[in-house]
Amino acid sequence: MQQIDYINWWEETKEAGLSEIKITFTKLFSKIAFLPSIYHSVLYKYLKNSQLKHWDKEIFAFSKVKISKIESQIGKEKMTSTLLSNFHQVVYAYQNLLDLEERIVLMNRFKGNEELKAKIFSINIYNDLLNGAFSNILKLYMEFQGVIEDNDKLFQKNLTPLVECLAKPERGYQTITDLADANIRNAISHGGVTADKTDMIFSYRKDGKHLQQKTTVYEFKDSMFQLYDGVSAVILAWFGYLCEEDISYDEVYDNKSIHEDTLFFFERLSMSTLLTTCDKVWQIEINNQEEKRKHVNIEFTGTDLDIDSRVFLGLYSAESVFRLRKLSLEDTIMVSFHSPKIVNSFFTIDCSVISELSNGTIDLSGAWQHVVNINGMLMFPVNDEDRNEFEDSFRYYPDMENEDFYITEIEDISNDYQKRFKAVAYLKRAKRKNHVKDTVNEIVDKLRKLENYGFSSHKVKHGKMEADIIYLVLYKKEVRRGKDRALFPSNSNFIAQIQYDVDMKFPINNKFIDSHLKKRREKAIEYNWNPNF
């Protein structure tokens, strides 16, 4: 297949939503008869993502008019060159919106009161919106305004002067600059925000005076969404301009005036589908006595794909990177996949094999057989259990404490056949090994009775049955980092590693430290003592 053909085929035959995108956005972008396929994945998010889909229609219409006016003032050629050379500002703003969208979803799912939501989520989200997406969009407009006014010194680094410069009536950006309340923006930028029950107070300085503005947590959250929806509409308008002018990868690739982050963004877009996003592509140089080569990593995130689908997208994406980056036959490519109901999967392939795939010497199955032959992959199946991803992500095991010990960092490390826990315990009163052993018996008894719940990404043994294996690290005093957590004899705070195994096989080992400790076994419990205890 040609570079983009496999993406088009995949979107048309394996995913739903392409026709809806084409109908919706060919109407919205009035100058086009078709959408450049490279933007399908972006437009799909504007149609389906829980926050991006609420983009502000009025701000979009204003932005379209403003973009058209800028083009009429500086001409199409200068418009295109200025946009492409500064498009990394759009990239940063767009990525910031996607990152904040995840936090907004968490905020909406959080069951605490509105005061707590404001303290944990909305104030920080608003601040990051101001200094991320909003600021970057204003920087883009500032670049165009410098071209319009023929003033290469028209530059502002910080948000407040950016807003003040563009908000002047003669420049006509007030509809955009007014998206962020000036007093709230000033207060947030200087840490002058407090939340008390349902009230929010914003403290700021203006003309040398200390002032305050009061609102409710509900009104503030609404203003945060107004800013988010407004900025997302501005970004959509710029993507609309790219579509209407049919500016695609050809205008970006090998363009020396393009910022490298813009190039990387288009490279990722060229390998993204509606539901599976190419999230990262990065290259490292391996140069040592044994070998000298380039290694490229490609990461995908999105929906849960079966192994055959991951092989298809992964191999053709590797072929695309091989050609676009002009890699040599000695180079290698690793493709990884991340999704909710699959353990992180990957495969590595030699570019010599990709070259054969590209020139038709071997087909897709032949290329994959090379990967299998060298055991260059870990590809896990989709977990078909009925799971709640959100609950699985935030499930935790409460700490346990009494006068003798404090158990914390309890973690389920079960596999298909064994129910397993790991934890850290601080012993408050144990001074001798016999004291430690008595306390360990009590700790193990508590931990092995815990119910575990499994994971979204993979199947494990879970339920109310007793644990098969428990792995503990024992310390004297509570610390969470530094040398007092080291598992070496020189650490006087470290007491022992403990492993309980009902089958007495003790499969968990640490080759870096086990040789420095004293191993003793007493039936189902193994002690790896600090020899200095």
Image (cartoon, rainbow, N blue to C red):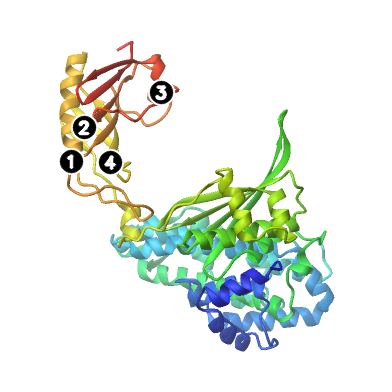
Residue beneath disc 1: 466
Q: Mark 4: which amino acid?
A: Gln
Name which of mark 2 and mark 3 comes first in the sequence: 3
Q: CA distance from mark 2 to mark 1?
A: 10 Å
Q: Is residue 95 visible?
A: yes
Image x and y of residue 450, in percent: 19, 43
Residue beneath disc 3: 486
17 up-or-down from 209: above or below: below
Q: What is the secondary structure assignment of the residue under circle 3?
A: loop
Q: Mark 2: which amino acid?
A: Val
Label 1: how many Cα within 10 Å (few below 14, some 14–19, many 20+): some
Name which of mark 1 and mark 3 comes first in the sequence: 1
Name which of mark 2 and mark 1 comes first in the sequence: 1
Nearer to us of marks 2 and 3 is 2
Residue beneath disc 2: 502
Image x and y of residue 515, in percent: 41, 16
**Front-most of 447 and 310?**
310
**Front-most of 201 and 135?**
135
Residue beneath disc 4: 418
